[in-house]
Image (cartoon, rainbow, N blue to C red):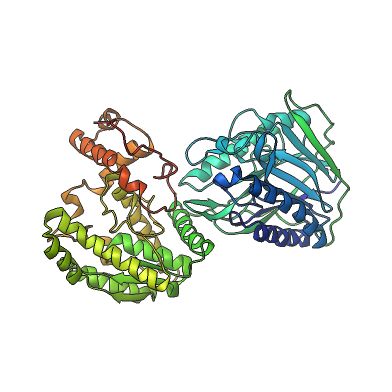
Amino acid sequence: MQALRIALAQINPTVGDLIGNAALIVSWTARAAQEGAHVVAFPEMATTGYPVEDLALRPSFARASQAALESLAVDLDRAGCGEVVTVVGYLERDRAGSRNSAAVLFGGSVVSRYDKHALPTYRVFDELRYFAPGSRLSITTVNGMRVGVVICEDIWQPGGPVPAYAAAGVDALLCLNASPYERGKDAVRRSVVERRAAEAGVPLAYVNLVGGQDELVFDGGSMVVAADGTLLGKAPEFVEHLLYVDIDPPPSPQPDRDPAPGWTVDRSTIPDLLVRGWHRAESTTAPEISGDEKSWSALVTGVRDYVHKNGFKSVILGLSGGIDSAVVAAIAVDALGSDAVYGVSMPSQYSSDHSRSDASEFARRTGIHFVTEPIADMVAAFVEQLSLTGVAEENIQARCRGMTLMALSNSAGHLVLATGNKSELAVGYSTIYGDAVGGFAPIKDVPKSLVWDLARWRNKAATERGEMPPIPEGSIDKPPSAELRPGQLDTDSLPNYVELDAILFRYVDSDQSVEDIVAAGFDRDTVTSTVRKVDAAEYKRRQYPIGTKITSRAFGRDRRMPITARWREV
C-alpha cells in the first residue's frame, strides 16, 4: 500500500462569490493533481467564504450554495481532477436549518457529507445563531486508508467527533478551518492540533483559511501533525499555498467499528488511486516569523482584501506627520502599492513645522501621492460664525479635516482610512465626525505602544533588505500630540501609553475589575479615570469604522457592550 498524499489548499475566497470561489477550488485542485495528491482539502466554508453571517439564514443563499457544490463536483471531473478526492466546506440546509458542512467530492459526485458538531458562541463567533449541529461522521476509504473529516471548533472542544472517529477507526483526520488571526494564537492552535492528533491516535491535517473578511483576518498556517506530536509539514502564513504531506499507511488496516453512541457514519470507498505524475516529495515546514511581523502581515492583509474585495482602487488618509498616520500609510503602501495611496497634509494654525516636514518626508520615502490642503480658513469660518472656544474649537479642526477627506473621497472614489489606534478609541480620545471618519480603520485594534513597536520593526525590516525605512524617525521619536491647541500633548489628559495600555488590557481584554487592576500595582486614581473614560466612550466606538482584529479582544463584534446603560464600574 502506497503512502497517501494529502494536499492542504489554504485559499482566499470571497464571501458570497459562489462562482469565483468554485473556480478557485477547481484551479487549486488541478495544481494538487499535477503534484500527485490523492486527497486535497480546502478550508471551512470555502465555497461560500466565511463568515457568511446572516446570509446563512436566507434559504435562497443556502439553495445557491447547495447547487454550487453539485456543479463544483461536475466541474472538477470535467477539469481532469476526477482522480483526486476533494474535500470542501460549504453551506448546507435541511429541515433542521442551515449547517456548516463539508463534502467529499469524487468522480463528479458528492460521495460523503459531514456537518460541524461544535458551534462556537464566544468572542467573534455566533454560530448557534446560524447553524444546527451535526451528528454524523464522514469516513472515506482512499487507497485502503480511512480518512475522517471534522470542522474547526470540533477539535477545540473535548469529546465530540474526535473520540468518535477513534472509536469508529480512521487512519487520518482532515480538519477544515476558518480560524482568525490573533497575536500569540498560533502556539495555542498548534497545541490543540497536537492534543487531538494524540486523542485520535492518527495524523491530523489542519487546513486554514487565509485572507481578510471585514474585521477578521485568517492567517493560514496549515499543518499536519502526527499522533506523537511530530510536525510533518507547515504552510507559510498570510499567503495562499498548497502544502503536501505523505501519510504512510498503518501497519495493519483499521477494521470497521461502530462509532460512539449518538453518531451515524456517512461512509464511502474510493477505488485505489494511481494519480498520473505521482511522486514522493519531502514534507515542507515554513520558517517561523516574529510576532511583530505576523501582526504587520495581518494588518496588510486586512487592508488589501477589504479594498480589493469591495472594489476600491485607492485609499486616502490624513498624513499628519505623527506615528499613527505614518504606520497606517505604510501598511497601505505594503498592501496596495504606493501609487494607490493618497496622503493629505491638512495643517491648521497649531500644526508644528516638524509635523508638516515629517509628513512630506514620509511621502518622499514611499512615493505616495501627497498634497497639502490647509484648513485654517475653514476653521476660522466655523469659529467666527459659531463663536467656538475650548473643546468645540479644537474639535472643529478635526471635523474640517474629516470633511476635507470625505470630499476628496467623493470626488475621486478613494476609500478613506481612519488612523485611530485601540488605546485612543478605548478612552474616547478621538473626534466623532472628525478623525473618526472613514471606511476602514487599519490600526483600530493596535494599542498605541504596539504602534511604535510595529513602526520600529517595519523600518528595521526595510534596512535589513537594503531599502529606505518608510517611517521618518521624527514621527517615531516625538511625543504624541493631536496639535489642536498650543503645546498640546496626549499626556495632558492621559497617562503614558505604556501604563495606559497595561490598564486597558486588564479592563477591556481581560474583564478585570478596578480592584483587580489596583491590586496588580496600578495607581487607583489613574485606573478610575481610565475606566470612566472607557465606559463613557462606547457610543463613539460604535460609530467608528471597522478595522482589522489582531488582539484577543477587539472593539466591535468581539466586545459587545450596551451604549445605554446605568451600570458603571466606578
Nearer the observer, 74 or 522: 74
- Residue positioned most to the right: 271
Q: How many marks?
A: 0
| Horizontal and vertical percent position of residue 310 | 51, 62
Horizontal side of 349 relative to 116 (left or right) equals left
Q: Residue at x 22, y 48 (%)?
A: 496
Nearer the observer, 433 or 141: 433
Vertical relation: 129 (above or below) 81? above
Q: Residue at x 31, y 30 (%)?
A: 513
**Within the image, what quadrant is residue 457 found in?**
bottom left
| Horizontal and vertical percent position of residue 454 | 38, 57
Vertical relation: 392 (above or below) 517? below
Say if residue 460 shows up in the picture: no
| Horizontal and vertical percent position of residue 167 | 75, 28
Which quadrant would the C terminus be assigned to in this image? top left
Q: Residue at x 35, y 39 (%)?
A: 508
Nearer the observer, 74 or 84: 74
Horizontal side of 116 relative to 123 (left or right) equals right
Vertical relation: 406 (above or below) 136? below
**Within the image, what quadrant is residue 253 found in?**
top right
| Horizontal and vertical percent position of residue 186 | 52, 45
Q: Residue at x 75, y 55 (%)?
A: 72
Say if residue 297 shows up in the picture: yes
- Residue positioned most to the top: 261
